[in-house]
């Protein structure tokens, strides 16, 4: 099925000068483009009323199910401007497919990945002047999301669902450049359990991370590390990023999938490391391994990754009663993998994996 997308231009679109001012220092998640994509779903009509309209607030009934029962999923991907001015998405197919899995977990309707891509492409084309160039590693962050918009307080999958896409020009997720993060190990909160929704990209996972994130920030840390809920022994992920551990023999360990987000950047990092000859172990990783191996020096680099955060070095882990330092400077392999990734994204090196796709 393909969507019949109606386009209504924004008569109050920002001037080229205003756009240029925003793109000069976009920050992360603060500015939004002139248009948004919206489509609706009902059991009778499937996906319908696909449209691009001026960016602006939704009219939502106070009884809309998402406001009460959090039936919602979202995605995050980026579009990059190459040196010749063309605009390319990175691994949008992987995001579209993950949204299908997230939607199934949250009992939301499936949006065909082809329709997801059609919506994203159409919106980027309309707002293409908002795609920053490669200066300061800026990009256009694409946020597709789907939520239960039916006004009904009974607890069951909603019969009216809205899918939308918004665009936000983005600089680095962490203000202050590529500096090693300090992480706080949460010993009182977990984010996912067996049979739960830890692998789904749904707002609830991020909402449940916030109290732990705040506790970490109160300890002077940037991000929080979650352990498994059953034994409190195995590293899962950060509030919004996957984790990698680099050993002095070149081995790299990353927590296995199951209760963690199936990160699109995570799987790209695994490929990039493997083609460089690194053995990547996807397995349970004990917090005691991290603490002991960092202290002994065999664990030489730790980094976190995600679409928004790209690849971000981790310098220190703190917990109640202790801390261990991995390094005060970004690790060598961390930065090599980061460079390899962004070079593909900005078209500066060959994309041998078929990850990038030209939109306009
Ligand atoms: C992303 O990396 O795109 C996410 O959705 C995570 C969020 C912390 C911004």
Image (spheres, rainbow, N blue to C red):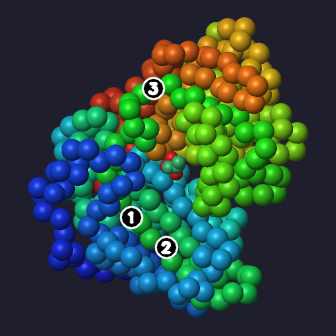
Residue 147 appears at what percent x and percent y? 56, 73
**Label 3 environment density (alpha carbons within 10 Å; few <14, some 14–19, many ≥20):** some
Say which element carries label 1.
strand
- Label 2 or label 3, whichever lies nearer to me, is 3
Q: Which residue is mark 1?
A: 166
Q: CA distance from mark 1 to mark 2?
A: 10 Å
Nearest to the observer: residue 190 or residue 319: 319
- Residue drawn at 73 percent across, 82 percent down: 156
Give the residue at x 44% y 38%.
Answer: 174
Q: CA distance from mark 2 to mark 3?
A: 36 Å
Please tell me the numbered disc located at residue 47. none
Residue depicted at 52% across the width and 41% down the height:
306
Give the residue number, with chain letter if any, for mark 3: 179
Q: Quadrant of residue 231?
A: top right
10 Å crowding of disc 2: few (<14), some (14-19), many (20+): many
Would residue 150 be seen by someone viewing this image from the given angle?
A: no
1 and 2 marks in contact (CB < 8 Å)? no
């Amino acid at each position: 099925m393909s969507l019949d997308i109606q386009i209504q231009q924004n008569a109050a679109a920002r001037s080229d000068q205003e756009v240029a001012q925003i793109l000069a220092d976009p920050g992360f998640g603060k500015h939004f483009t002139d248009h948004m994509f919206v489509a609706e779903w009902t059991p009778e009509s499937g996906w319908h009323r696909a449209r691009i309209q001026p960016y602006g607030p939704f009219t939502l009934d106070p009884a809309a199910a998402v406001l009460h029962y959090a039936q919602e999923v979202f995605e995050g991907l980026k579009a990059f401007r190459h040196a010749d001015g063309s605009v390319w998405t990175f691994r949008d197919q992987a995001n579209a497919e993950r949204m299908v899995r997230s939607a199934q977990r949250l009992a939301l309707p499936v949006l065909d990945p082809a329709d997801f891509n059609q919506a994203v492409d159409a919106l980027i084309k309309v707002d293409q002047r908002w795609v920053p160039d490669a200066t300061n590693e800026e990009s256009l962050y694409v946020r597709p999301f789907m939520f239960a918009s039916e006004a009904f307080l009974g607890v069951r999958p909603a019969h009216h669902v809205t899918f939308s896409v918004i665009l936000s020009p983005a600089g680095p997720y962490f203000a202050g450049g590529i500096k090693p993060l300090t992480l706080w190990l949460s010993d009182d909160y977990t984010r996912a359990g067996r049979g739960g929704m830890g692998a789904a990209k749904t707002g609830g996972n991020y909402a449940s991370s916030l109290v732990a994130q705040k506790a970490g920030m109160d300890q002077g840390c940037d991000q929080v590390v979650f352990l498994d809920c059953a034994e409190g022994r195995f590293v899962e992920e950060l509030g919004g990023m996957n984790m990698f551990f680099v050993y002095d023999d070149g081995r790299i360990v990353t927590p296995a999938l199951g209760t963690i987000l199936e990160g699109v950047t995570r799987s790209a990092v695994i490929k990039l490391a493997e083609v460089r000859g690194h053995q990547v172990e996807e397995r349970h990783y004990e917090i005691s391994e991290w603490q002991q191996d960092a202290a002994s020096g065999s664990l030489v680099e730790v980094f976190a990754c995600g679409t928004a955060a790209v690849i971000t070095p981790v310098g220190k882990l703190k917990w109640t009663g202790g801390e261990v330092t991995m390094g005060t400077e970004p690790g060598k392999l961390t930065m090599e993998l980061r460079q390899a990734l962004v070079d593909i994204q900005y078209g500066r090196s060959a994309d041998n994996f078929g990850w990038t796709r030209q939109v306009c």
